[in-house]
Image: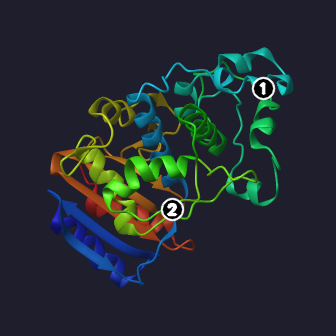
Amino acid sequence: MIEAVNKFIEAIEYDNPGVEAVVLNINGEDKIHKVFYPIAAKNIYSHTKSYTSTAVGIAIDEGKLSLDTKLVDLFPEYLEFAVNEDIKKIKLRHILTMSSGFGKPYLMGDQRRAGVGFPDYMKYMFSRPVIDEPGSKFVYSTADSHLAARMVEKAVGKNINIYLYEKLFSKMDMVYPIWETDPEGHPIGGGGLHLSIKDMMKLGILYLNKGMWKNERIVSEEWVNLATTKKIDTGNKDEWGKEYGYQFWMGPKKCAYRADGAHGQLSFVIPSKNAVLAIQCSDYNDFPKFQKLLNDIVFTD
């Protein structure tokens, strides 16, 4: 693994496609730490979704949520805005697998910047038609992740950033992070968390260790196993995007799963190597080139 990652670094040093930092952690130790630009907390985009998933897992461990909790169970006050009855079928498990049934990508970054959904994202989503049977079809949508985060907040009675700081960030020697919020101040469950590569990858290390951080249980092993195994086919034929768990992607290859943010904000967990490979990239990178280098050099079998 070390040799392969060093070859990957040599390749990007020759013709850097926009990689800013690479860290390889094996057996709890950083074996490679290569930084091309000064380290700073940056937007990890949809990598955030895996942190939201962990908040869900912790709330379930505490008995405050279940995978079968329905969206309307926690937000009955928004039912008056629903356009059809199928919204009553949406469960947390559907939201986590991007199969809510809304059938379109909602609250993506460009939509949020354009003011779509302002000022109340919950009202906006309740007013969207449910066009697919919940649980039947994968449609990647940041709105699903945001709904999951709002369900956590309602169940535990506090902002998800505060909840994760108490339950995870502070225990794992992480700062209280900058996190993009919706117009009402609720952190975006599907993006906008700002972390350095060292803090970003700590989630991968936590999952590699089955929910343990040092000698403390952060989230249950049961949740780790549930979240990081295939729950739904996406319909994508590419091995990077064929299978999805609970806000984690499977692959590439059978050896790994990953938290994945736009423009190459990645934490790969590779259990057979007892390793986590984290990469952060510029927002203006050549992702196809970067992806090909990973496939050709690191994930070869």
Residue beneath the point at 54% across and 53% down: 46
Q: Residues within 10 Å of mark 1 (few under 14, many from 20)?
A: few
Look at 16% across and 66% down and name the residue there.
Answer: 2
- Where residue 67 sits: x, y (%)? 49, 23
Amino acid type at mark 2: Ile
Q: Nearer the viewer, residue 108 or 199?
A: 199
Could you tell which of marks 1 and 2 lies nearer the N-terminus? Answer: 2
Which amino acid, mark 1? Glu
The image shows residue 48 at horizontal and vertical percentages of 51, 53
Residue closest to the eye, 246 or 244: 246
Residue at x 72%, y 21% (from the top left corner): 87
The location of residue 299, given as percent across then percent down, is 28, 55
Q: Compared with residue 191, is residue 88 higher up or lower down, i.e. above or below?
A: above
Q: Quadrant of residue 152?
A: top right
Q: Element under label 2?
A: loop
Cα distance, mark 1 to mark 2? 33 Å
Left or right of residue 270: residue 246: right
Q: In the image shown, does 285 or 276 lie closer to the viewer?
A: 276
The residue that mark 2 highlights is 44
Q: Is residue 245 visible?
A: no
Query: Is 178 on the left-hand or right-hand side of 300?
Result: right
Q: Secondary structure at mark 1?
A: helix
Between 8 and 151, the residue placed more toward the observer is 151
Is residue 28 placed above or below 157 in the rendered structure? below
Residue 207 shows in this picture: yes
Q: Specify the quadrant that holds the N terminus.
A: bottom left
* Residue 25 appears left or right of 232: left
Q: What is the number of the mark on residue 77?
A: 1
